[in-house]
Image (cartoon, grey):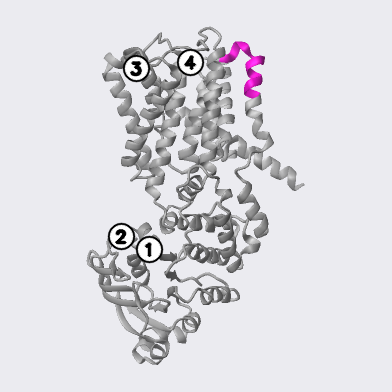
């Protein structure tokens, strides 16, 4: 069994009387391929926001490599190796694809604070951004502005930006949402081609993608962990089928 | 466009183009062609520098402010008060002092104000400027209050060039030299990785946080640099006219510089040049022709720009070039 990269202990979040995360105990090993599923409103995105620091938990802890990062600002967690994509695209809409990725790469390489050297002379930043753009099959769109791209292509830029941060833990919030099914294999390929030491936690409604990609699956219902296990265990779990998969498979 | 072309474009964006010599040649040409209008020309150069400072925060970092005259005024009062009360009337060190004072003011107010954004930020920048204006009004023993500080004398620039009270020849070339130096520094800054990250902050704050950028520190730093440049513009203004009053801190000047930037086009540096020239020419000719109603002309122009040229005059030029190029 490999080392635990991420752990949450009793992670809870309340908005007034509404409990969106209930004492979540969760573990992710280095290099894991893990999926988080659950019906709409189960608190999946809230959980991601708690992990990245966008939301502060009401109770509980988040540990990265055994270190408590519960109170760490989002930007500091990125430096520790947590990167994410957003359920709804968060891109630099007026900038070309290549420069969207370059901005992320520049921050990782510590170039972002350089006030003198032209950004265009950072050949290392541009080359790495170019490599990621190619990896996501965006080469032909590299010079196009985000707001000129179809939504599906924009989803790929989200992933390219996250990869540009060279994360140890990658949180993918519905990466295939809005991508035409003909193109979803590009996302799957890109995720499958990730270095094996990166842990990936994916939130996804596309069960085909989940069962092909994830080794372990956690089912979240009403802000609490309902079931967890290997994909075979989850697929065979009658309660899970009743609560979630059943409705999804019937549809 | 292929990846190669996109990479080439990103890698060469900072390079100087041949046409970038044009504004400077024009400014030098104007010195010889219009010797009677050098006072007006000096005004234009000062406002270009002021508008450039605003372009850094508004056009690049996306920080909306209606109080930028606070820093222009801080720079102007710094050189004037040093000259009047401390006998410090050497112009270049005066500029440095003005940049320092305005920059620190920008750093302090930015640190507090940039926790907010949008309309709240707009109101708070306005309040900061109003506070400074009232302070200058109240401490009239130092600032001259409502009457201002007339008749200040400055030493020759570098000990060589006397300020030229009648024809503004020295002032014009001095303002041009300062503008050039500040422009070069600003051009380097906006094309640096820091400058690109400001554009990222403008385009998507949330995403910039999510790539691990220290967003607020960058905003505050940009705000302080911009304030220092505005301070230099104010200082040149005070030295060139050897006169300072509360108008340097007022809403009229703050709104004027915003109009200049919108008129010329923001987020592109050269919009400040085109906008300042267009605005001041318009003001000059309209106020001569219709002394009581000239602001109506400015208002109508603004409405037209807002309706038909959202990216200002230079944006309009771009659109026309694209249309012709497409044919």
Quote the CA–CA distance across marks 2 and 4: 51 Å
Tell us which disc is closer to us: 3 or 1.
Answer: 1
Quote the CA–CA distance across marks 2 and 1: 10 Å
Q: Secondary structure at mark 2?
A: loop
Dot 2, how many residues are within 10 Å of its Cα: few (below 14), some (14-19), or many (20+)? few
Instruction: Give the mark, 2 or 1, whose residue is nearer the N terminus.
Output: 2
Magenta-colored span: B26-38
Which residue is most to the front? B159
Q: Quick check: do tags 2 and 1 share a chain?
A: yes
Q: Check whether the beta carbons of the residues at disc 2 and disc 1 lie within 8 A of each other.
A: yes
Tell us which disc is closer to us: 1 or 4.
Answer: 1
Residue under circle 1?
A: A80
Residue under circle 2?
A: A72
Considering only vertical position in the picture, is B320 above or below A83? above
Is A246 in the magenta? Answer: no
Residue under circle 3?
A: B81
Q: Quick check: do tags 2 and 3 share a chain?
A: no
Residue under circle 4?
A: B240
Instruction: Give the mark, 3 or 4, whose residue is nearer the N terminus.
Output: 3
The image quarter in which residue B277 lies:
top right
Q: Quick check: do tags 2 and 4 share a chain?
A: no
The image quarter in which residue B286 lies:
top right
Q: Residue at x 25, y 70 (%)?
A: A12
Quote the CA–CA distance across marks 1 and 4: 53 Å
Dot 3, how many residues are within 10 Å of its Cα: few (below 14), some (14-19), or many (20+)? some
Q: Residue at x 63, y 47 (%)?
A: B12
Q: Quick check: do tags 3 and 1 share a chain?
A: no
């Amino acid at each position: 069994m490999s080392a635990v990269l991420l752990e949450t202990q009793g992670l809870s979040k309340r908005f007034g009387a509404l409990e969106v995360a209930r004492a979540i105990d969760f573990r992710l090993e280095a290099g894991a391929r893990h999926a988080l599923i659950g019906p709409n409103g189960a608190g999946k995105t809230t959980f991601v926001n708690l992990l990245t620091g966008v939301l502060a938990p009401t109770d509980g802890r988040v540990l990265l490599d055994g270190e408590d990062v519960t109170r760490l600002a989002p930007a500091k967690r990125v430096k520790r190796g947590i990167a994410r994509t957003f359920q709804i695209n968060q891109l630099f809409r007026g900038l070309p694809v290549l420069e969207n990725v370059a901005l992320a790469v520049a921050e990782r390489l510590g170039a972002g604070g350089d006030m003198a050297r032209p950004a265009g002379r950072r050949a290392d930043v541009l080359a790495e951004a170019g490599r990621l753009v190619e990896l996501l099959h965006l080469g032909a769109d590299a010079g196009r502005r985000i707001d000129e791209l179809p939504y599906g292509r924009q989803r790929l830029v989200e992933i390219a930006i996250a990869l540009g941060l060279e994360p140890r833990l990658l949180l993918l919030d519905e990466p295939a949402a809005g991508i035409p099914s003909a193109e979803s294999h590009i996302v799957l390929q890109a995720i499958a081609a990730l270095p094996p030491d990166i842990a990936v936690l994916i939130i996804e409604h596309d069960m085909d993608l989940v069962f092909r990609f994830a080794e372990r699956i956690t089912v979240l219902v009403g802000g609490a962990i309902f079931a967890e296990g290997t994909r075979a265990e989850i697929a065979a779990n009658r309660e899970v089928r009743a609560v979630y998969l059943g409705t999804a498979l019937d549809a | 466009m292929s990846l190669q072309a996109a990479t080439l474009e990103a890698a060469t964006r900072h390079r100087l183009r041949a046409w970038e010599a044009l504004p400077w040649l024009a400014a030098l040409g104007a010195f010889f062609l219009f010797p009677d209008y050098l006072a007006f020309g000096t005004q234009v150069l000062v406002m270009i520098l002021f508008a450039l400072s605003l372009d850094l925060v508004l056009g690049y970092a996306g920080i909306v402010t209606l109080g930028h005259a606070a820093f222009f005024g801080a720079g102007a009062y710094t050189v004037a008060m040093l000259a009047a009360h401390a006998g410090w009337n050497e112009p270049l060190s005066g500029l440095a002092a003005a940049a320092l004072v305005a920059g620190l003011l920008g750093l302090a107010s930015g640190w507090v104000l940039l926790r907010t954004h949008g309309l709240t930020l707009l109101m708070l920048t306005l309040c900061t400027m109003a506070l400074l204006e009232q302070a200058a009004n109240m401490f009239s023993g130092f600032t001259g209050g409502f009457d201002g500080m007339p008749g200040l004398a400055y030493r020759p620039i570098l000990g060589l060039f006397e300020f030229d009270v009648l024809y503004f020849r020295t002032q014009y070339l001095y303002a041009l030299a300062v503008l050039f130096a500040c422009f070069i520094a600003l051009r380097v800054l906006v094309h640096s990785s820091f400058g690109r990250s400001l554009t990222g902050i403008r385009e998507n704050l949330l995403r910039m946080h999510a790539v691990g950028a220290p967003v607020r520190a960058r905003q505050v730093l940009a705000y302080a640099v911009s304030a220092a440049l505005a301070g230099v513009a104010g200082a040149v203004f005070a030295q060139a006219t050897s006169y300072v009053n509360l108008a340097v801190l007022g809403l009229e000047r703050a709104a004027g510089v915003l109009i200049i930037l919108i008129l010329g086009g923001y987020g592109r540096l050269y919009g400040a040049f085109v906008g300042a020239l267009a605005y001041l020419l318009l003001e000059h000719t309209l106020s001569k022709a219709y002394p009581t109603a000239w602001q109506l002309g400015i208002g109508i122009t603004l409405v037209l720009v807002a309706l038909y040229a959202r990216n200002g005059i230079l944006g309009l030029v771009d659109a026309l070039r694209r249309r012709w190029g497409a044919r």
